[in-house]
Image (cartoon, rainbow, N blue to C red):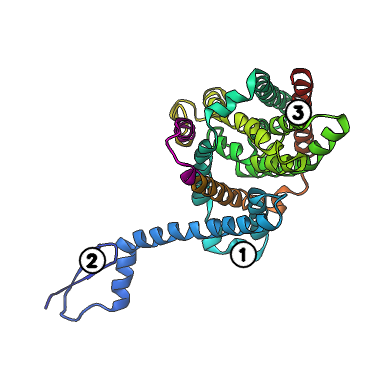
């Protein structure tokens, strides 16, 4: 006697099973079939959603902690949280360890949303001398780092990551180009570690040296924005220079961020081993960044919306920084290669030295 039995999953998948007897199949067998057929989709969907929980929770925690320790900033705190988690037992938990795609997406959304902080008029307001400082510093730092990295015998992908991060906007820039240059994960971790360590040191060094040299608050703010690696680090350094210096330092820094789009295009078509013709001319999130700049420049968004967008941008970037921190495993990085430390030191000196000379000469 033949019996036909069916079961439906929550994904809408229907499993039909025909047996030679009227006896129904066991529930265990039906569950197995559902998992093999339609259940996998549901598990993947649940897994994808779960991977967003840890990065967003870490970002929220970083935002809260940054109100207590404002000098560090939420992005740096989020990165430290990621480093602590991945080097603890928590790092092996499936819901936490499987974060890669989720944190990359969140970070790229954050990079795109950065454009809402950058009205084009603010860049123009820096004046010709400020624009020269920005462009010349980025060019000198990027090309100088590439030259030194090749002379040190480091791999091209690692050198490009360091050059991009130190010349543009730190870990966010590194994340923006890592796929383009097909960088190894260990190289990404090394570049992020270097830009974090050296940029954090500059938070204190630049304001202190500006006082020693005798720079005005305006000159010190331009120097900080043109030389320090991360956006959050620039904000922290600006606050040490003076309340009025924060806005100018951030404007100069975001002027450097604006150069991420053209640099990404150049790298996609000139870097050995890059995706080249198989990659889009410009990554989608860079196009979104440019679009966000246009929206902010248009003045269509009210201040209330911009305030919410600013908070959301920080949250997304912090979640992405948490993911980058999760890539920094102590056992993979220690001991730090001498060549990488040398490259990071020289790159920082190029950025700081070039921008300081230009600030003194032009402002």
Stretch of the chain drawn in magenta: 286-306
Q: Are circles 1 and 2 on residues that touch, CB within 8 Å?
A: no
Residue, x 61% and y 64% (percent of image)?
90
Q: Which label was assigned to residue 90?
A: 1
The secondary structure making up most of the magenta span is helix
Residue, x 50% and y 40% (percent of image)?
113
Between circles 3 and 1, the one closer to the viewer is 3
Q: CA distance from mark 1 to mark 2?
A: 37 Å
Neighbourhood count class around disc 3 (C-alpha, 10 Å): few under 14, some 14–19, many 20 upward: many
Does 293 lie within the magenta span?
yes
On the rendered image, what quadrant is the C terminus found in?
top right
Lower position in the chain sequence, tag 3 or tag 1: 1
Residue under label 3, please give it.
Answer: 219
Q: Is residue 305 visible?
A: yes
Secondary structure under the numbered disc 1 in the rendered image: helix
Closer to the camera, 156 or 84? 84
Lower position in the chain sequence, tag 1 or tag 2: 2
Between circles 1 and 2, the one closer to the viewer is 1
Secondary structure under the numbered disc 2 in the rendered image: strand
x then y, percent, for residue 236: 71, 44
Neighbourhood count class around disc 2 (C-alpha, 10 Å): few under 14, some 14–19, many 20 upward: some
Neighbourhood count class around disc 1 (C-alpha, 10 Å): few under 14, some 14–19, many 20 upward: few
x then y, percent, for residue 16: 20, 67
Q: CA distance from mark 3 to mark 1?
A: 45 Å
x then y, percent, for residue 196: 70, 44
x then y, percent, for residue 265: 52, 25
Q: Residue 97's image quarter?
A: bottom right
Q: Which label was assigned to residue 15?
A: 2
Closer to the camera, 55 or 291? 291
């Amino acid at each position: 006697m033949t019996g036909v039995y069916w079961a439906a999953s929550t994904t809408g998948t229907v499993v039909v099973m025909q047996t030679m007897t009227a006896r129904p199949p066991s529930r265990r067998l039906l569950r197995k079939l559902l998992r093999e057929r339609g259940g996998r989709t549901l598990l993947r969907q649940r897994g994808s959603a779960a991977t967003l929980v840890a990065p967003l929770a870490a970002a929220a925690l970083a935002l809260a902690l940054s109100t207590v320790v404002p000098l560090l900033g939420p992005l740096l705190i989020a990165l430290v949280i990621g480093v602590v988690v991945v080097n603890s037992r928590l790092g092996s938990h499936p819901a936490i360890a499987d974060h890669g795609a989720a944190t990359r997406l969140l970070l790229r959304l954050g990079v795109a949303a950065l454009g809402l902080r950058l009205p084009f008029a603010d860049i123009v307001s820096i004046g010709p001398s400020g624009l020269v400082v920005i462009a010349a510093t980025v060019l000198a730092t990027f090309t100088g780092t590439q030259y030194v990295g090749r002379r040190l015998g480091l791999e091209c992908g690692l050198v490009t990551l360091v050059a991009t991060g130190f010349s543009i906007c730190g870990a966010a820039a590194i994340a923006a180009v890592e796929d383009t240059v097909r960088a190894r994960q260990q190289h990404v971790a090394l570049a992020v570690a270097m830009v974090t360590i050296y940029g954090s040191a500059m938070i204190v060094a630049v304001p202190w040296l500006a006082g020693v040299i005798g720079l005005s608050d305006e000159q010190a703010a331009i120097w900080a924005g043109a030389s320090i690696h991360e956006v959050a680090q620039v904000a922290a350094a600006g606050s040490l220079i003076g309340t009025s210096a924060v806005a100018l330092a951030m404007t100069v820094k975001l002027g450097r961020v604006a150069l991420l789009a053209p640099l990404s295009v150049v790298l996609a078509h000139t870097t050995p081993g890059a995706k080249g013709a198989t990659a889009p001319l410009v990554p989608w999130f860079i196009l979104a960044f440019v679009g966000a700049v246009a929206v902010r420049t248009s003045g269509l968004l009210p201040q209330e919306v911009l305030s919410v967008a600013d908070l959301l941008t920080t949250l997304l970037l912090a979640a992405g920084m948490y993911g980058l921190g999760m890539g920094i495993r102590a056992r993979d990085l220690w001991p730090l290669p001498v060549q990488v430390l040398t490259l990071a030191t020289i790159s920082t000196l190029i950025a700081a030295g070039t921008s300081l000379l230009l600030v003194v000469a032009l402002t």
